[in-house]
């Protein structure tokens, strides 16, 4: 009996392991995704808290009494970035509280006598992160003043007397019902993602992969029905199933909340104003449509029901990343974050619950989400239209074979990104030499190893993976200065646009290194140019552009190049720079040109950071960036004029 069990077990395990794609999607990829997603979320949260700690907050003080230590408290608060607004010129307390509700102020502190003993009241908003930050700074400043004053009295008088013999109470202008509603709004998109993807996955997989296995999809496609109609019908069916699951689960959760079964005492919720309901429902609707579209796109690419099931867990983890970021108070809804799939609608839902439904970020989130849904459905329709030629196996097989090197190179890039993200957190937190160790780990270890593995996995020769010969154009070196200046101008222009969309975007380079200038140039200009170009414009670009897929290869290599910098606020400029570098590599046929452009770009930023007033110089360069961008078309024209032989055509 045991022998038969062992034989069957061995056979089943071999059958499972033989399906490499299933093992990768169901076992390996989720194991790599969890640390990467949590690491990225932690970095975003830490960066947001750091930016919040640097913000200037306004506290209005209405003092009927003036303790002797009040000026010291004011100095302590100003050192902590709190602007002290005392004795307002006009308006009663009600007017100040109205300004606090409108978030023009972050706190109102009343100091007045009560029962012959000084007391105070701090008015703040428990639903606003900046107001909560102000409350924490006030607590820390007051405790610091109390300790110093007490130590002074002990030293002078010898008595441990508390001079700050007054207390304050904290009053939040946000009602408990509003606070509970804001907490619900934070986690509502997460519930929507988990419930919809898990509840509608079987319907999506069966509508595409299941019919393909049963052979009924071909029967459907031979009828004179447009592929768009078939796609729309299947999409709406999957969406209705998912929406039903979401509504039933939300109703169940609300019942559990009211009954106090979620670890809370229950209670009513303060719903958003009527004007915000339309925006709230629209964003939730678009969010559900986008999730359903992603599920349908993945299911339409699956060749079997089993393969479609293997896609669900990675898709869920990828969807949890942007919706998880929306739970962080430091992540705000701007025009830039509204462009991010799933993140924009999730933040818009949070804003609508808070009563701030209208704004540029909300409109951008709605428009970009609708555009993504239409683009996804169009791609599904094209895939179904291609199913009309299912009998022509050879062309489809050849197309799949042409895309294998690109998929393998992208898989290597994904693994390298996860390893780089993990190493950046683990090594970057070192107390001594952390930034240098982090750069050395990523640029001298991870990327060279990824370059070697990607070239082997994509079956590229070293001349294809790392083209190091002379440029195809005889005037490439003449065009190089124009291209380098144009790339720098393009990057600065992208930063200028992004700063308008996202005011907290920061500086073009947020890596701060000590040491000599030569060491900074080596680690921030030369080493990144060599290592990053060798991988992103080397085997990754060569493999993804094979078979004439120039646009897909350029976009994918530039996207991974931007992701590798682990900064959402730096994504747009870095992505644009990656497109320019990839275009230079394809136009010249050598890595030396993009390496030189990359090194020049980073060297300019390092030189800028070494100046006494880098912010003023950066602002001046950004104003001149439209003129610098003209170097790109001029360099392209010189390259085209310098082509010889067949390349001139």
Image (tube, rainbow, N blue to C red):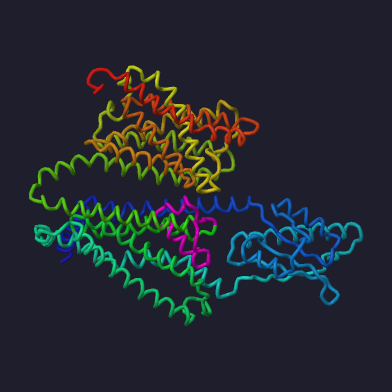
59 on left or right of 316: right
The residue stretch that appears in magenta: 330-359
Q: Residue furthest left?
A: 391
Indicate the position of residue 463 as horizontal and vertical percent values. Answer: 28, 26
Quarter-of-image position of residue 245: bottom left
Residue 477 lies in magenta, yes or no? no
The residue at the far right in this view is 157
Q: Is residue 469 visible?
A: no
Residues 623 and 515: in front is 623
Q: Is residue 615 above or below residue 234?
A: above
Query: Residue at horizontal 60%, vertical 53%?
Result: 52
Q: Would residue 498 appear left or right of 138 to someone viewing this image?
A: left
Q: Between residue 583 and residue 314, name the one nearer to us.
A: 583
Q: Quadrant of residue 608?
A: top right
Picture quadrant where residue 204 is located: bottom left
Percent coordinates x, y for residue 16 in the rendering: 21, 56
The relative height of residue 263 versus residue 3 in the rendered view (above or below) is: below
* Of the pair 201 and 457, the residue shown nearer to us: 201
Q: Quadrant of the N terminus?
A: bottom left
Q: Residue at x 42, y 41 (%)?
A: 562
Residue 187, visible in the rendered structure: yes
Count the numbered circles shown.
0
Q: Percent from the top left, x then y, of residue 319?
A: 37, 57
The quarter of the rendered structure image containing the C terminus is top left
> With respect to residue 504, does 544 lie above or below?
above
- Is residue 345 shown in magenta? yes
Where does the image place residue 110, in percent across and percent down from the top left? 76, 67
């Amino acid at each position: 009996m045991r022998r038969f069990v062992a034989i069957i077990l061995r056979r089943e395990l071999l059958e499972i392991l033989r399906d490499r794609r299933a093992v990768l999607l169901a076992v390996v990829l989720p194991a790599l995704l969890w640390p990467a997603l949590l690491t990225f979320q932690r970095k975003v949260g830490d960066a947001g808290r750091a930016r919040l700690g640097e913000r200037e907050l306004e506290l209005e003080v209405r003092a009927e009494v003036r303790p002797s230590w009040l000026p010291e408290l004011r100095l302590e608060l100003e050192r902590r970035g709190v602007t002290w607004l005392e004795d307002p010129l006009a308006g009663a307390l009600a007017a100040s509280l109205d300004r606090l509700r409108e978030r023009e102020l972050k706190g109102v502190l009343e100091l007045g006598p009560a029962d012959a003993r000084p007391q105070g009241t701090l008015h703040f908003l428990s639903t606003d992160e900046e107001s909560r930050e102000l409350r924490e700074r006030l607590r820390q400043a007051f405790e610091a003043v109390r300790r110093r004053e007490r130590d002074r009295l002990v030293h002078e008088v010898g008595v441990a007397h508390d001079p700050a013999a007054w207390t304050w109470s904290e009053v939040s202008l946000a009602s408990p019902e509003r606070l509970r509603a804001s907490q619900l709004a934070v986690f509502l998109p997460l519930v929507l993602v988990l419930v919809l993807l898990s509840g509608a996955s079987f319907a999506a997989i069966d509508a595409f992969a299941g019919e393909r296995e049963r052979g009924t999809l071909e029967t459907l496609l031979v009828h004179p029905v447009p592929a768009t109609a078939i796609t729309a019908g299947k999409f709406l069916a999957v969406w209705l199933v998912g929406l039903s699951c979401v509504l039933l689960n939300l109703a169940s959760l609300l019942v559990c909340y009211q009954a106090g079964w979620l670890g809370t005492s229950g209670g009513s919720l303060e719903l958003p104003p009527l004007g915000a309901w339309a925006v709230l429902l629209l964003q939730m609707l678009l969010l559900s449509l986008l999730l359903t579209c992603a599920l349908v796109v993945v299911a339409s690419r699956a060749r079997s029901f089993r393969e479609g099931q293997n896609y669900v867990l990675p898709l869920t983890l990828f969807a949890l990343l942007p919706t998880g970021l929306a739970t962080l108070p430091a992540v705000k809804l701007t025009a830039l974050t509204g462009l991010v799939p799933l993140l924009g609608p999730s933040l818009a839902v949070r804003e609508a619950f808070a009563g701030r439904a209208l704004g540029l970020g909300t409109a951008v989130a709605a428009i970009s989400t609708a555009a993504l849904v239409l683009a996804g459905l169009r791609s599904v329709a094209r895939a179904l239209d291609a199913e009309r030629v299912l009998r022509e196996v050879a062309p489809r097989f050849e197309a799949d074979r042409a895309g294998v090197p690109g998929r393998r190179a992208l898989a290597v890039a994904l693994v390298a990104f996860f390893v780089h993200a993990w190493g950046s957190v683990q090594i970057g937190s070192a107390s001594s030499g952390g930034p240098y160790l982090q750069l050395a780990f990523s640029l001298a270890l991870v990327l060279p190893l990824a370059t070697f593995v990607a070239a082997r996995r994509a079956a590229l020769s070293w001349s294809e993976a790392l083209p190091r010969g002379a440029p195809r154009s005889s005037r490439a070196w003449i065009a190089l200065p124009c291209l380098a200046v144009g790339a720098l101008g393009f990057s600065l222009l992208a930063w200028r646009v992004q700063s308008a969309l996202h005011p907290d975007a920061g500086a073009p380079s947020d890596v701060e290194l000590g040491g000599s200038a030569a060491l900074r140039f080596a680690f921030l200009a030369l080493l990144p140019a060599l290592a990053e170009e060798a991988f992103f414009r080397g085997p990754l670009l060569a493999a993804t552009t094979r078979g004439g897929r120039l646009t897909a290869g350029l976009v994918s290599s530039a996207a991974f190049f931007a992701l590798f910098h682990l900064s959402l606020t730096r994504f747009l400029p870095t992505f644009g720079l990656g497109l320019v570098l990839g275009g230079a590599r394809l136009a010249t046929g050598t890595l030396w040109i993009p390496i030189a452009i990359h090194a020049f770009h980073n060297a300019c930023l390092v030189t800028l950071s070494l100046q006494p007033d880098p912010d003023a110089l950066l602002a001046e360069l950004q104003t001149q960036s439209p003129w610098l961008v003209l170097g790109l078309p001029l360099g392209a024209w010189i390259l085209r004029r310098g082509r010889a032989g067949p390349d001139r055509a």
